[in-house]
Image (cartoon, coloured by chain):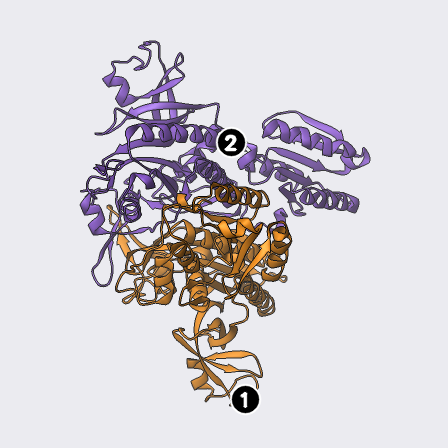
Chain colours: A purple, B orange
Amino acid sequence: MLQSQLFSKAQKKVPQEEKSINAQLLIRAGFIDKLMAGVYSYLPLGFKVLKKIENIIRSEMDNIGAQEVFLPVLHPKHLWQQTNRWRYPEMFKLKSRLNKEYSLGWTHEEIITPLVQKFISSYKELPVYVYQIQDKFRDELRAKAGLLRATEFIMKDLYSFHQDEEDLDEYYQKVKNAYLKIFKRCGIGEGIYLTLASGGTFSKYSHEFQVITPSGEDTVYLCLKCKLGINKEIIKEEKFRCPQCENKKLEIKKAIEAGNIFKLKEKFSQPFGFFFKDERGKEKSVLMGCYGIGLGRLMGTIVEVYHDEKGIIWPIEISPFQVHLIEIRGKNLKIKKTAQKLYKDLEKKKIEILYDDRIDKSPGEKFAEADLIGIPLRVVISERTLTKNCLEIKERKKQQINLIKTKEFSQFLKKFFKKEY
Amino acid sequence: MLQSQLFSKAQKKVPQEEKSINAQLLIRAGFIDKLMAGVYSYLPLGFKVLKKIENIIRSEMDNIGAQEVFLPVLHPKHLWQQTNRWRYPEMFKLKSRLNKEYSLGWTHEEIITPLVQKFISSYKELPVYVYQIQDKFRDELRAKAGLLRATEFIMKDLYSFHQDEEDLDEYYQKVKNAYLKIFKRCGIGEGIYLTLASGGTFSKYSHEFQVITPSGEDTVYLCLKCKLGINKEIIKEEKFRCPQCENKKLEIKKAIEAGNIFKLKEKFSQPFGFFFKDERGKEKSVLMGCYGIGLGRLMGTIVEVYHDEKGIIWPIEISPFQVHLIEIRGKNLKIKKTAQKLYKDLEKKKIEILYDDRIDKSPGEKFAEADLIGIPLRVVISERTLTKNCLEIKERKKQQINLIKTKEFSQFLKKFFKKEY
């Protein structure tokens, strides 16, 4: 894409009340725009990242046999009354002109459970795995963490339906592994700790996926023996020892929750009377699991983890572009031609490239913006590189600038992508 | 996909109050589920169609240089007050716990105009084309037309920003052509009439894309000389003659509106004070166009146009699958093996295939369901086809059933896809 065509632009100012690193950098770099507290628009760059995260999640959900659906935002009151959750204070409520009462979905158990129930009555039809990627809404009193805790946010929520605990356990493991793959592909595989959290009424533990990072809002106790995180609530119950190995040497770290998985068991099948007939014709409650990832939250988390004082440093698989080509034109028109040719060649090879073809920006401004936007590889064509038949190469996460022969660039790229993906 | 795995199932019953053909067939065939009046869930089959429509629209929008964004559903009151549209009765309104007032977006001029305004101040930065695909909400008093007039619906809305009328006109034409391409790819190119409609305050005409079909809710007057539709309002003003050629022999037809395009001109740039500096440094209002297509509405329209008494007849490019493979097993296990092999071979070739591997359904039930679901090509493997080294082939839109040699199937498919796409 030509950077001159991009309608959104990098900015120096951010809204004063925006305190979080993720929102500050994403707004300054032109990925998102703040409409009001907790509510953001995704601009073209941000939308590209969002789509990449979405596609990673979708492919890993499909890999574990989940079927994608799309459930409404507007929910009828009676379903939420049935589970006694209509009173949830964070839930937005509204009325139609005819005085019908709705809520805006902040989760979808109340919709998916009776929906799947319509089609399933026998053990032969179980298990079922269903997911969606959809807007959700939560009436936050203080929405101050940028994309980490938004009022309107995009979630992937997966729900699984089983005939017994063994089957639920097995799928729960599969989802755990799928989540680890998702986070790895999003570049935060290293910092992720599977973390024990409270399971509510129905299960001893649920699991959070906590990313260790200094700006994290959660506190996690790490057992390095088990490679396990333990959250605050649990660690108090367990008297500050690891519930798995009883280790008392735990490291205290700040972290951000990037996803969570729950065994709901009968929590929702009971109030909806969702039963099935087992092999012997006996009626039993369906057992459920639910598994969430916030897409915008994940994007915000990645920015919190990968940035420096100059800007964002995107992991390659979710970067809006793979290569940032910068033309430092000067008066030599041959520079433009060389840059245009490289741009076309790379596009033909299906490499995603942002080409800074702007003529009203100084080299310094262009470099500063490139650092702010954070594409993994910067390639510069200038008077100097041209005379040497070279390209100037800089990886966003490194300091070093290299000149490489133009004819060797294709080989270099292959190696670079191999290393990064 | 294995049909035995599909959690949604074809049904004989539909909700009593569901009068529209599109909702009846889509619910019976398991594409959508009705949550409440005007609010539907997309089940796996329906979601696949939705995604195909989305991808067609996205590719045609990208082709005319539009940049994709994702704008919030929750809108702050003050922006809608600025354009004097806060009182719009179909707009859902709600309050937060802190008494902040929001509306749910039913269109996004109030969001996109001040957003683009943040980045654009000079003629050099114009034109700008921005679109999104997002949920929208309208508080309908009577939501009775299935996906054609839903309370919650998915829209593609494109907005364009220009420095003068000439530039707006030129892009308006481009969008018109892109829309015709979209409708052609969705299989309704033949029945589409570009139709003159009222332009509101700022423009003599806007354009609707009307699909002629007996169940249509709109009345359109067709001038066959101009290949132009004229809507009710306009035809009355023009005293029942074609505004282009003055032809008085007009055909009256029922139609469904599948999309519309408007020249907004200064309607929104004025209240937001969205000005730019022209080449001479003079301040001028930005001129806008807006261009909508409802994705679910389009899906419903296609069903209204393409169905028979047995079910839906999907055009191939938006069909959930390209081939419906049906195994009539009987007692011969070789039938299953042959079907499985064909299924795998076709999947390898990236052909999308629904494989009816269910053993608890009679051949009659399987055929009836296949007709209801409406995939363009049905392939049957049975005792009879096996002994003849054949496959039984039936196109959904034809009556005729043919046997073809198994080894000739690949050739047949190529020809079939060439004809259909």
Residue pictured at 22% horizontal, 42% vertical: A89
Circle 1: residue type? Asn
Report, in whole angstroms, how far the alpha carbon at label 1 lies from the one at label 2.
63 Å
Q: Quadrant of residue A86?
A: top left
Residue pictured at 52% horizontal, 85% vertical: B242
Asked whether, in this view, residue B343 is left or right of residue A260, the answer is right
Dot 1 and dot 2 residues touching (CB under 8 Å): no
Asked whether, in this view, residue B382 is left or right of residue A163, the answer is right
Q: Quadrant of residue B280?
A: bottom right
Q: For mark 2, what is the residue?
A: A185
Depth check: A256 or A119 in front? A119
Depth check: A309 or A125 in front? A125
Q: Residue B316, how many percent across, how many down?
A: 53, 58
Kindly identify which chain the residue marked by label 2 belongs to. Answer: A
Q: Residues within 10 Å of mark 2 (few under 14, many from 20)?
A: some
The correct choice, above or below, for A396 with respect to B199 in the image is above
Residue pictured at 39% horizontal, 28% vertical: A256
Kindly identify which chain the residue marked by label 1 belongs to. Answer: B
Q: Residue A346, how many percent across, how many down?
A: 69, 41
Q: Which mark is residue B247?
A: 1
